[in-house]
Image (cartoon, rainbow, N blue to C red):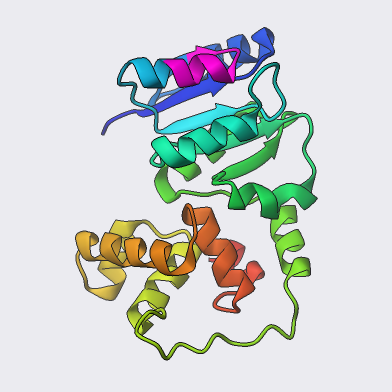
Amino acid sequence: MSKISIAIVDDEALIVSLLSVFFKLQEGIEVSYTTESGEALIEMLTAKELKIDVLILDLKMKGQSGLEVLEFLKVNYPTIKPIIMTSHYKRSFIGFMMKTGVSAFIPKGISSAELLTIVKEVHQKGFYFMPDQLNVIREQVSSRAPQPILENATDISERELEVLQLICFQKTAQEIGDQLFITKRTVEGHKTNLFLKTDAKNIAGLVIYAIQNNIVKADEIFLN
């Protein structure tokens, strides 16, 4: 099995150094790039081909901020899964962060063991929510939100709804295919359609859409 290739971008040199040493000691992880500025990351990506599966990114940095880096990645490298790790963490930011294309939003005070788990979850399933973040999402969605009416050809099909629900329950494409008796390639096709129809930028955005439209309940995500 190929290793998870990660990059670390933070303007605190000590953070970069400590995280780099920690991840290099972990089985199944490869540190492909580290830097202390968003500009350097963008220059590196532009200048040469660099394999990055998961990016650990600071939010507030000297020069280009994490948000500016996210905008660049969203347009040019949508397959990179960004984890924002910041000392400016507020759980109320979670909705905005998901809209920008973030796969996970976490505080810098998180333990190294939990960070490793989050990296693996993001790589495998495309997103990670902390329990208190789901509470915020649930609080922001009206209990009277109407059930979506899916009648037009451009609306989500019944099969796509099934795929969306299983994505929310943190199933991989292979697991979804096995459960629905369809191929992994067919699952990926349904996911592509879901991105187009919901205007979501990543898997986390699909989860937010599903919660906001009463397709799944926030509590169910952690129960499955």
Nearer to us in this view, 85 or 154: 154
Q: Is residue 2 above or below residue 184?
A: above
Residue 18, by quadrant, is top right
Q: Residue at x 56, y 28 (%)?
A: 56
Residue 146 image point, x, y percent: 64, 87
The total of numbered circles placed on residues is 0
Question: Does residue 115 appear left or right of residue 166 in this picture?
Answer: right
> Can you say which quadrant of the picture contains the N terminus?
top left
Question: Does residue 17 appear left or right of residue 4 in this picture?
Answer: right
Q: Is residue 179 above or below residue 64?
A: below
Q: Residue at x 34, y 21 (%)?
A: 50
Nearer to us in this view, 212 or 125: 212
Main secondary structure type of the part rendered in magenta: helix
Q: Is residue 5 above or below residue 214?
A: above
Q: Is residue 36 above or below residue 150?
A: above
Nearer to us in this view, 123 or 51: 51
Q: Residue at x 44, y 50 (%)?
A: 125
Residue 106 image point, x, y percent: 68, 39
Q: Look at the image and tell me whether residue 125 can be seen.
A: yes
Segment colored magenta = 34-43
